[in-house]
Amino acid sequence: KKKTLTDDGGGSAFAPLVVLELAPDTKEEAVAWLLSRIRDPQHSGGDGDDFLSMAECQYIIKHELDTLRAKEETHVPGHSQAKLYPGKSIVRRLQSKGILVQMFPLHEKEELKRLSFSWYKKVKLAFQPLDDIRHYYGEGLGLYFGFLEYFTLALVPMALVGLPYYLFDWEDYDKYVVFAAFNLVWCTIILELWKQFSASLAFRWGTLSRKRAFEEPRPGFHGVLGFNPVTGREEPVYPAAKRHVRIYLVSVPFVLLCLYLSLHVMMIYFQMEGWALTLHDQDPTFWTGVLVFVPSVIYAVVIEIMNLIYRYAAEFLTEWENHRLESSYQNHLVLKVLVFNFFNCFASLFYIAFVMQDMVLLRQSLATLLITSQILNQVMEAFLPYWLQRRRNKKMIRRVQKRRTLGEQELPLEEQVRLEADMSTYLGTFDDYLELFLLFGYVSLFSCVYPLAAVLVVLNNVTEVYSDAFKMCHVFKRPFSDPAANIGVWQLAFEAMSVIAVVTNCALIGMSPQVKAYFPESDTQLILWTVAIEHFLLAVKFILTFLIPDVPKHIRIKLARLEFESLEALKRKVKADSSSCWTTC
């Protein structure tokens, strides 16, 4: 029988917020010791009452549990094999030794029902209830769903403009100049306007001015116990030189090796593609015509598998690098994953475009990769979760019948905990942002070749909103909230993609036969004109970035007023303290 601890944050009435599931063979002395450390006065969570949302209370409890570090203990009581060292995270040690199975916050059934109804159960043309999502799941998920909605709506003009190009099947690439220029400028505008929308959400939710200057060490960070010169607290210390050695002598060579392997797989794909095309040219039948698309489909599936395997390797390496702050850990992980995924997904398209210079094959490969990846994502993110939920519903019905609960009578707390413990664990917004990043690449990098890409991405994102909402409400355990003021390093990733898109689209249009016909005598003039237009578009992008402020003016005024009022209040307090001091003296 599994042992379960529930932590209610120290309130007098027992209202469980967070569950810690221990292994069945956990010793009683270990349970007693863990409870005593959780109840230590310096780690008291307090009662949030109505001031804090449930998600915020659960985040505070998780923070306190993550900051539990070993002191004089040499091992976990009753488990001599689970060694403890001063400064090491207790929760991480219990998890690595299999004593702590999992830790998760509980769902609130009534609030979840209301959120589900307003979020996805009513099929309607309306915005998502972002404030309700933020209140239940925290700012991190609120910003993700806000970005998903914004990104989908922002692509609609690109889809509407690109649809006629696809339907009329214009082959004159000089006609795509206006379309490509519109897409490139529009990508800049939507990314800059997203900063404003994001700042408005963060201001409304109270996280816009959140300081990260004194960010706590991440739970997985380890080192010799020392003192932080800024805070004066005891915390692990790890030499930066050791971390740099691990990054530059192990992680970087590993990433380069993976890129080489990806390049090797890509060349195998081109050999298969050449074989299929040769077969079709020799015997042009229906089946050989179908066979032409098979290498691209196989390559798209292989890309997804390689991305998944590399993701686990990147997480292991970034954890091994032992970054002190969570923000630093996320930045290094995102950089590793983005470099490989970008190369793995788009290298073949760049090769076709700029080495083979085959625009027909480029359009065919882009369409095949995009459609295949979307089908795989829909299977993994929509149909599979739905199937898992049906299985879980059958299990719940059997348990309810066994308990003989009638009608709408609620399950006992213990049964609710057991049911939620069996639910899948949500691994964060990383994969969700990565998927949007790659879709943005398919839309922007080669927009002048396949204008239908924006239409397909819009349709994909509409179903993504509903499938993600369903999964969050019924498939996954409730995740711990993640206080956030913006989408972090992903903003830089999308902006970098938009800059690369300017270069690729200008080069593709410059290479087209129709544009080359304008410069029959000199290739040098063509290159100079292409580079000049590219620099002009980049200049327009940077001018727009400068002209559109990151934070709306009315919010800047409110922030300045809040800062002014805080300084005035501090002055009054100092003046009152000095007056009382003179009076007593």
Image: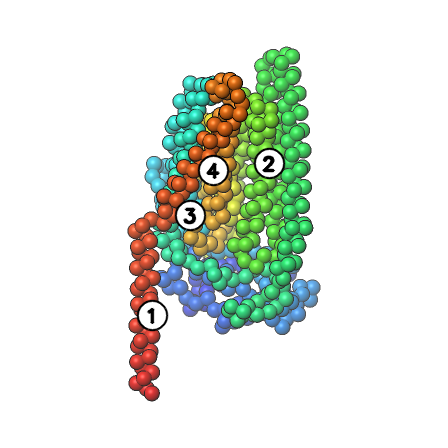
The correct choice, above or below, for 313 with respect to 157 in the image is below
Q: In which quarter of the image is residue 207?
A: bottom left
Mark 3 or mark 4: name the one nearer the start of the chain.
Answer: 3
| Rendering coords of residue 81 (x, y %) | 69, 64
Q: Residue at the location (30% across, 59% down)?
A: 561
Position of the N terminus by quadrant: bottom right
| Mark 1 or mark 4, earlier in chain | 4
Q: Helix, strand or loop at disc 2?
A: helix
What's the CA distance linking mark 1 and mark 4? 45 Å
What is the three-letter code of the residue carrying label 3?
Leu
- Give coordinates of residue 16: x percent, y percent: 46, 61
Q: Is residue 190 visible from the viewing direction of this image?
A: no
Q: Name the residue carrying label 3.
A: 143
Crowding at dot 2, Cα within 10 Å, few <14 / some 14-19 / many 20+, comes out as many
Q: What element carries label 4?
A: helix
Give the mark nearer the N terminus: 1 vs 2. Answer: 2
> Going from the N terminus, do you reach mark 1 or mark 3 first?
3
Q: Is mark 1 on a helix, strand or loop?
A: helix
For mark 3, give the secondary structure.
Answer: helix
Mark 4 — residue? 498
Measure the alpha-carbon separation of dots 1 and 3: 33 Å
- Check whether the beta carbons of the residues at disc 1 and disc 4 lie within 8 A of each other: no
Please give the name of the residue rendered at 57% of the width and 23% of the height, measured from the top-left corner.
357
* Tag in front: 1 or 2: 1
Q: Name the residue under label 2.
A: 344
Crowding near pointer 4: few (<14 within 10 Å), some, many (20+)?
A: many
**Residue, disc 1:** 570
Residue 246 visible to an observer of this rendering: yes
Marks 4 and 2 sit apart, C-alpha to C-alpha, by: 18 Å
- Answer left or right for 179 relative to 332: left
